[in-house]
Image (cartoon, grey):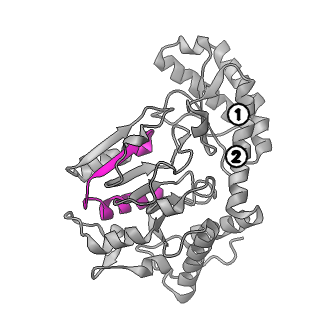
Amino acid sequence: MLSDAYVGRSHRSKEGRARLKSLIERSKEMLGLPEGYRLGIVPGSDTGAVEMALWSLLGARGVDVCAWESFGEGWVTDIVKQLKLPDVRTFVAGYGKLPDLTQVDFSRDVVFTWNGTTSGVRLPNGDWIPAEREGLTICDATSAVFAMHLPWDKLDVVTYSWQKVLGGEAAHGVLILSPRAVERLESYSPVWPMPKVFRMVKGGKLNESIFQGDTINTPSMLCVEDAHDGLTWAESVGGVLGLVERSERNLAAVSGWVARTPWVDFLAEDPATISCTSICLKIVDPWFEGLSAEDQAKVAKKVASLLEAEAAAFDVGAYRDAPPGLRLWGGATVETSDLEAAFPWIEWAYAEAKAAG
């Protein structure tokens, strides 16, 4: 699978650039991006792609920021405390909930995640975003792209990494720009210094070469080949539609298990918002709820460590800032049969942790 990787070759060689451009074009085609949308490979995984967008685009008008988990709250911090923009409104909801999206003003720029990777809460659709709007919509969609249907015409900036739904390597991010986002880049210059790895404009015009395979910094051609392989696999299971179907099937399996398991429930309060990739679960056993927050965290960690010790499930502990519980990955790379095989093990591990007190 990696025999065609251009390792040991310059990424700026004819062959290296062709391999990068091919990955860009394949990604655009599979995602079904509208005419005029650009897709580029940028440094720093999804985080780097989001930071690139925030630093390059914000400041031209007021900003509304929506957050309902740790990564969204991180973008609030960047905008308020790092960029220190003077006109920012924040709409923040606790784990398990969405903020009141009807309060968002689309005459302003709007920043949000599509799927709360650490809360398991996703946007059910894009109906809350108007087709006609003055501001830009900037969406961190790293655990949603390829697993959920996105309304591309309502999204001006979208970011993701190969790591999540495609199961590829991290370190590289993907940045998608609509024509409206490009227009902003070419008509507005932020007042703050722009780091080299964020610069997308040259001579007042978008540096189109970034979106043709000329990366700003040196990419790993091994990771690039791995991303190609991920797309090839995605094509073999039906493209985006097949990937979404696989992920939704995984959620359905977890939903069935939750329905018949009295001590566990989804962290998401509204069934329409339950993520099909980052499936976050809370423990609702009265015994567990009677413990202190510190002891609850210990029990949840004990469950995860028991599962790992038996090689039954790995990395299923809740995110460090989330309420104590479990987080199962339901992305398209996970086989439903593997999730179903894990359920009895999870029940066993919880029983063991509860018996240990």
Mark 1 or mark 2, which has the lower sequence index?
Answer: 2
Determine the image quadrant of residue 287. Answer: top right
Residue 166 visible (yes or no): yes
Q: What residue range appears in magenta?
A: 46-72
In the rendered structure, find residue 255 and report the number of the disc placed on it: 1
> Residue 195 appears at what percent x and percent y?
29, 66
Amino acid type, callout 2: Glu
> Residue 339 appears at what percent x and percent y?
74, 39
Amino acid type, callout 1: Ser
Q: Are marks 1 and 2 in contact (CB under 8 Å)?
A: no
Residue with the most extreme bottom position: 14
Q: Left or right of 234: which side holds 85?
A: left
Pointer 2 residue: 248
Disc 1 from disc 2: Cα separation: 10 Å
Nearest the eye: 204 or 52: 204
Residue 188 against residue 305 in the figure, above or below: below
> Residue 136 appears at what percent x and percent y?
37, 60
Crowd tier of the residue under label 1, counting other residues whose Cα lies within 10 Å: few below 14, some 14–19, many 20 or above: some
> Residue 170 appears at what percent x and percent y?
53, 58
Q: Is mark 1 on a helix, strand or loop?
A: helix
Residue 255 against residue 350 in the figure, above or below: below
The residue at the point 48 percent across, 76 percent down is 36
Q: What element carries label 2?
A: helix
Residue 312 visible (yes or no): no
Q: Does the magenta stretch include residue 50?
A: yes
Residue 202 against residue 312 in the figure, above or below: below
The residue at the point 70 percent across, 76 percent down is 3
In the rendered structure, find residue 124 and report the number of the disc placed on it: none
